[in-house]
Image (cartoon, rainbow, N blue to C red):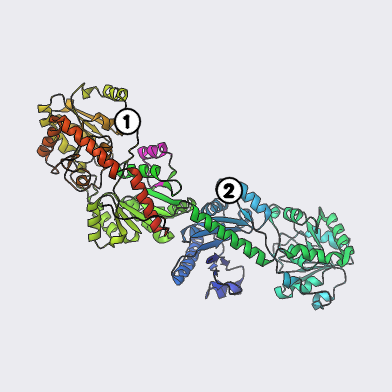
Amino acid sequence: MDVVCCAPVRAHNALLRAIGLLFSARETSAHGLPGLTILRPLVLPFENRFSFLRRLNHLILFDCLQREIRRRAAIPEALLTNSPFFAPVFSCLPARLRAYDIMDEMTRSASAPRNATELERLVVAQCDLVTAGTLSVSRLKSSQYAGVVDGVRYVPCGVDMGHFASTRPSVPPPPDIARLPKPVVGFFGAINERVDPEVLDTLAREMPGASIALIGPVYQRFPALGSRPNVHFLGLKPYSDLPRYLAAFDCAIIPYRLTEGIEFVQPVKVLEYLAGGKPVVSTNIPDIAELYRSTVRIGKDPADFAAKVREAIAEGPARAAEYRLAASGRGWEEMAREFAGLLRDAAARRQARPVGVTHLLHGVHFGGAEGVVINLCRAHHPERCGASILCLGNGKIVQDRIHAANIPAAVLEMRGKADLAVVFPVIARLRAWKTGVIHTHSSRTNLVGRLVSRLAGIPVVTTVHTAVERDINDFGRSNRLNAWIERRTQRWSAMLLTVSAHNRREIVRTGMPEDRVVHVPNGVPLMFSRPSAGELDAARREFPALGAGGPIVGMLASMRPRKGPEVLLRAFPAIAREFPGARLLMVGSGEFVESTDYLETLKSLAVSLGIPEQVVFTGHRDDTTLMLALMDTVVLPSLFGEGLPLVILEAMALAKPVVASRTEGNDEAVRDGVNGLLAPAGDDAALSEAILSLLRDPARARSMGEEGRRIAEMEYDIAIMARRYEAAYSRVTERDELRITNYE
């Protein structure tokens, strides 16, 4: 597997090494193995103290990883990290598989940022594989993140068995340890705040004839140790020389203080000591006590520790072979094979999962796109597609509909139209949801989704419900800027799906490759409970103005000027003159129009036309099926800017005849004279005549409604639409289970 591991180096940790990293931050594996790349970018200290340094470090890491991706001209199969503190960068970088190896309980360290646990939770949620190097940490994190990740795998560290078992007592020890009086009690490792000075002091006092040899760098954080002539600090030694020093030990020790956090430690030196055949004494570190109870002696306090050391020295080399055997099963090769197996298993699980699709919605107003997305999420086959919704605004109607449909969802609000900083929390959320495809539905979500795709490598699919330049809610307000942005960024979408053939032709004409523009008509649920007679009677009682028996002409839409409600109002007086008992039912809110109270404008127009008693305005309704069932004729007099209106398809599903304007989208669903009638857009006289022709001939109207139901069953079933969308997701994620073609 192609694995990229990012392990940053802080400038103050190793100055000479850091200077070298300025010139080359990329390494291959130590043995030149193919498939492993280690990136060690130089980052700056004190990032928790200064926010600008934290941002600068994020940029350094992001640039380093992006350069590696550009170098290989492909995203890595797996991205591995062992630090949770660079979560924002880890979120942005593309990879097919993400893994987090928890080498220590870093969230409790003194250098951890204040939001360390939050950052780690974010990384854990994004990963396909989470491992831990100690038993205690694996148990802690499995419990801590029980609802976030499916278990934390324990992968114990290894030991270079051949290296530490290679030297025998017959080999002369280094001079500085050879001249020390016997017996020698030895330790190698960092001599810092973890080492307990009380244990060392007690050991030196209880065993004055023994030499206590401490090998390793001494840090300033190491507490002062009283003057003991038999305690010897031998300094830092090369790794290659450690077996010779180990051979000189009569007993090896791990004198760690039992402070908070030490319970999560499992020192590699335990295996190194055992590989050298040496008896080991440790303080009561939980992992050591549990895993090595038969080979490592545990000192419960400083005096007991000294007693166990004397016991180990008295033992001599009698159990050396037993100790080597205890370490022999945990070589680095075994650990590497175990880790590689876990990565392969995680990749197989990810491939077997349904495609994770997140629909990005504006979320402020409820319109046709929102209705399509909710229907689509409910129609997907759970074994092929796992759908969720992420809204950039918090509209109550939208949220109520999503929650009623029981669809996984969240809101990340944009502070304004230009708030592109929302891209980063969106990426983090998508990673946590294991999103494989972003699906966008409007000019705003198209831009955000495409920026996310460019940064994070998640493919984006865009549904064109309405051409952006014609998606105008309020006359007098231009959409030119959005249209310009759309033209410049539409190629960033892996695929464009158009709900109408007209929109597909228009997009292809702009130069978009034909194979990336696919016509997939909208669909609606055909299996639903039709309103009963009792429910219809109750609705009529709710709106007494509908009368008892006259025909009901209805319009259901998000009321805005381009939908043409004013044209229908102007057409209705002629209908009312011929059918005095006729009523006009106008269902929908005017929330899309922000410059005025558009419903009040329409009501004022009804008054000026002399038909206020014959027109019923309901505002927004959740029971749209019931409202459509009340109507004898469903009308959609759009002026322009339609894709494939859901209301027409819903009317067809209810076997209602439709009268619509002859404009893009409408004329694809309404076949003139077959399942409805078409009238020129904006022509109220022609519209009234079309409606009257159906009211005069109920048998013809009924026949058209039945034909509309038949067409809906054949062409506009939501199950058909969902299957075609699943094929699109399969294609952009390079899964070949399904094949998508243009609707004909």
Percent x, y for residue 645?
25, 43
Q: Is residue 380 above or below residue 697?
A: below
Closer to us: 237 or 345: 345
Three-letter code, disc 2: Tyr
Quadrant placement of the N terminus = bottom right
Magenta segment includes 411 = no
Percent x, y for residue 64?
49, 68
Tell me the number on the disc at residue 107. Answer: none
Residue wearing tag 2: 145
**Is residue 601 at least partly visible in the picture?**
no
Magenta segment includes 390 = yes
Task: Tell me whether the residue at label 1 lies in contact with that at label 2, contact meaning CB atoms closer than 8 angstroms.
Answer: no
Tell me the number on the disc at residue 530. Answer: 1
SS at mark 1 in the image: loop
Closer to us: 460 or 514: 514
Q: Is residue 40 above or below residue 729?
A: below
Question: What stretch of residues is rendered in magenta?
Answer: 389-406
Mark 1 or mark 2: whose residue is earlier in sequence: 2
**Is residue 453 at least partly visible in the picture?**
yes
Estimate the spatial distance between the alpha carbons at disc 1 and disc 2, rounded to whole Å.
45 Å
Percent x, y for residue 464?
29, 52
Q: Residue at x 68, y 52 (%)?
A: 136
Three-letter code, disc 1: Arg
Closer to us: 612 or 150: 150
